[in-house]
Image (cartoon, coloured by chain):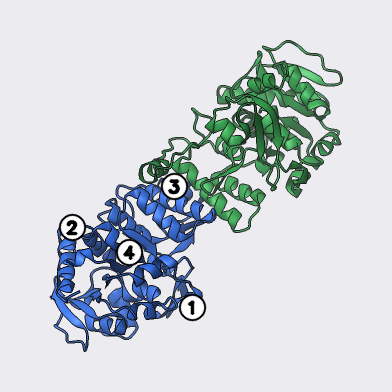
Chain colours: A blue, B green
Amino acid sequence: MAVDKKIVVLVGGVGGAKLALGLSHIVPPENLTLIVNTGDDFKHLGLKICPDLDTVMYTLAGVVNPEFGWGLQDDSTTTLNTLEKHYHFEPWFRLGDKDMATHLLRTSMLNEGYTLTEVVSFLSQQIGVKPKMLPMTDSDVPTLVETETMGILGFQEYFVKHRWQPVIRSIHYKGHENAIISESVKCALESADILIIAPSNPWLSIAPILSLPHMRDLITSRNIPRVMVTPVIGGAAVKGPTAKIMSELGLDVTAESVAHYYGDVITGFVNDTQNVELALGGIKTIQFDTLMNDLDDKIRLAQSILDWIGGWGV
Amino acid sequence: MAVDKKIVVLVGGVGGAKLALGLSHIVPPENLTLIVNTGDDFKHLGLKICPDLDTVMYTLAGVVNPEFGWGLQDDSTTTLNTLEKHYHFEPWFRLGDKDMATHLLRTSMLNEGYTLTEVVSFLSQQIGVKPKMLPMTDSDVPTLVETETMGILGFQEYFVKHRWQPVIRSIHYKGHENAIISESVKCALESADILIIAPSNPWLSIAPILSLPHMRDLITSRNIPRVMVTPVIGGAAVKGPTAKIMSELGLDVTAESVAHYYGDVITGFVNDTQNVELALGGIKTIQFDTLMNDLDDKIRLAQSILDWIGGWGV
């Protein structure tokens, strides 16, 4: 059974968190490790904000806002409203009052000298997440977006402030060449039996992870199933800017483009039943319904993927 | 009229803020400067908290919690509750969600390199305080309390966590000997026509201000009315630990003790009508009803004090 194997998932925000949640329902927690993108991280009002880590953590803890897919459910914005009312500070980044607890505690622990890896371990355990969650690195690797009309934007400026509307010329993972892969991430990848790349945005969520020094080598050196799940369904992304970015970068908005982008990182490809069937040289492919609307969908997809990989003879 | 004079007030928290509010109703804002104790300031969850500055600011902006005399009215504690619920972090210091806006913005501005004086100026103007508010210094001068049974406590630990119950042996203003009086404070004192010491706790609120290098000389060198208002009424403090501390420090709990403690810093003494009449060599004294329950009381006392000083022939 594939669930007895050590499974490592590369994951970004909302879309990827859904598959991670599905996996967490069928894989024993000690066999599941999530390596989470930190390229979106930034400082806001002095707080260290880690959008993807929080989305994954809240999702797996069962406290995520079900409408948005991020943030905490039933949250309020009293602090933000007060910043606006009393200090005329116009917030462009939504910070809920409940969510604030996470940012405050994380920032405070980081300032005390804990690594992000240690902080994420503490917070995720406290909030009740059982699988291991690891930030992709403890180094700062902020994603920068070069736009046609607004110059270079920090990721959250691009994504939240300007609602991913500026046309992208290129994407940079600033400082990636000097970033250090933590021992925890290295160890997880070296002992993994299966690697899954969640259906997250390849350029904004997965590429920052792959941009880390030696990361591609570390992954491709492992003779294990390395399977991606398509983030593109029927020529579009389920949510967010994946399709828009692909077309701005001059790529066909197809699952095939994404598969080519990952190149030798992957050995297996979970395509969606709505996409055209693909034959990729040397890469195993299969088609599932990859749309995950409810918890059953998530568990079903996770189970299908593991069953499929289990059939490879792992 | 004394209200045409430049009035500087040394002030701490709740009690002092009441008189400051009264003064702000009758003195044109350009003639009123409040020098506020920062000895209570501390860091909590990475946030810079300035209890006395906030109490004075919220009081003068008309947004203070009327029940407590500190904090913002109609505040909630969603962030604190979430820290407890999700992260099992037990908060001993109450941080309201509205109040959080102040701490976040202040901490963020300080981290960006603004001085506390600049931050206080910005925040107080934004929230609608008209008189000038100045922190006593931009240096860190944390008040430490040496207790009989618990060793040395930070001020907020003593005051909030242990509800000022430990018996005090001595009080220290850590780092005061190296603190620097800001140009703004120096300038305000040098150009003052009247100095008023608010009915704040002498040892916890006013002494930290007087402990700053050259502060006593700066004050006593000014040949102006320098008037204190008794924080002791009928052998007790209106609120807080003043009387308890006086008795622990071996002092009589009387207005006279406080007058002696201030020594040559003061030239005038506003006693309460409930206290015994005093004759203090070289110090003008008068008795007023100094209890300030409502806004009328605050304005009436402020007016009485200024009328009295006006009669000195300033």
| Spatial separation of the CA atoms under disc 2 and disc 4 | 18 Å
The residue lying at 73 percent from left, 47 percent from top is B184
| Spatial separation of the CA atoms under disc 3 and disc 4 | 32 Å
Find disc 4 in the rendering and name its residue.
Answer: A34
Secondary structure under badge 4? Answer: strand
Amino acid type of the residue tagged 4 in the rendering: Leu
Across and down, in percent, residue B107 comes to: 56, 51
Discs 3, 1 touching: Cβ within 8 Å? no
In the picture shown, does residue A186 fall above or below A24?
below
Is residue A82 shown left or right of residue B12? left
Secondary structure under badge 2? Answer: helix
Q: Earlier in the sequence, mark 2 or mark 3?
A: 3
Amino acid type of the residue tagged 1 in the rendering: Glu
Q: Residues within 10 Å of mark 2 (few under 14, many from 20)?
A: some
Q: Nearer the viewer, residue B310 or A150?
A: A150
| Spatial separation of the CA atoms under disc 3 and disc 1 | 38 Å
Across and down, in percent, residue A147 comes to: 42, 78
> Please, which chain is the residue tagged with disc 4 on?
A
Find disc 1 in the rendering and name its residue.
Answer: A177
> Please, which chain is the residue tagged with disc 3 on?
A
Amino acid type of the residue tagged 2 in the rendering: Leu
Q: Earlier in the sequence, mark 3 or mark 4?
A: 4
| Of marks 2 and 3, the one in the foreground | 2
